[in-house]
Image (cartoon, grey):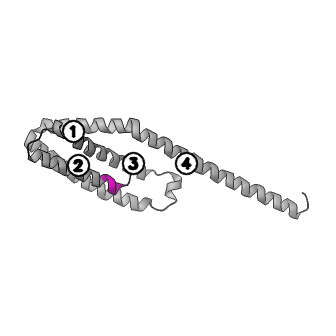
Amino acid sequence: MDPVTIISGATLAFNTIKKGIAVGKDLQDMSGQLAQWAGAMSDLGRAESKAKNPPWWKALSGDVEQEAMQIFAAKKKAEEMRKELKQFISFSMGPSAWDELMRIEAQVRKRKQEQEYRKEEIQEAIITWGVGGLAALLALSILAGGIYFIGLQQGKW
């Protein structure tokens, strides 16, 4: 996912949580929105770590710098949301409610890491090895073709 999509999903969940708290809903009643917000925060952290160490084939495209700027902007917005949400939840429901939200976020991050991110890592490894294998095969074909044509020119074949 791109950072813009991640932060827009987080903003939607954030606004829904704020409205729910404003009308007196309990955190348990907003578990779907909390999970969505926590998932977006986890996805943003994952995007940041991937941008710091992109695969070699992705670094060739030149989009890495633009993605890094988008991640930076999204991270700043996420920090503002987290700060505002902490103040809002702590003020209206008490500090223990914020601790509960942090536990939910940790659970979501762990689940995503075990399931979704692992699948993504496997897909990326397949692409990396596939592209690398094709590049090696192409290089060997060019080398073999060059040797063949040099041999033909010298009358050895």
Based on the displayed image, in which of its 4 quarters is residue 28 positioned?
Answer: top left
Can you say whether 46 is above or below 99 in the image? below
Q: Residue at x 45, y 43 (%)?
A: 120
Can you tell which mark lies on residue 128?
4
Can you say whether 62 is above or below 97 in the image? below
Q: Residue type at mark 3?
A: Ser
Residue 83: horizontal and vertical position, in percent? 18, 49
Between disc 1 and disc 3, whose residue precedes? 1
Bounds of the magenta segment: 1-6
Asked whether residue 10 appears in the rendered view, the answer is: yes
Between disc 4 and disc 1, whose residue precedes? 1
Residue placed most toward the observer, 40 or 96: 40
Which residue carries the number 1 mark?
A: 31
Q: Residue type at mark 1?
A: Ser
Mark 4 vs mark 3, foreground winner is 4
Alpha-carbon neighbours of circle 1 within 10 Å: few (<14), some, or many (≥20)? some
Can you say whether 132 is above or below 106 in the image? below
Can you tell which mark lies on residue 13?
2
Q: Residue type at mark 2?
A: Ala
Q: How far is disc 1 from disc 3 in space, using C-alphas?
A: 27 Å
Which residue carries the number 3 mark?
A: 49
Residue 2 is covered by the magenta coloring: yes
Mark 2 vs mark 3, foreground winner is 2
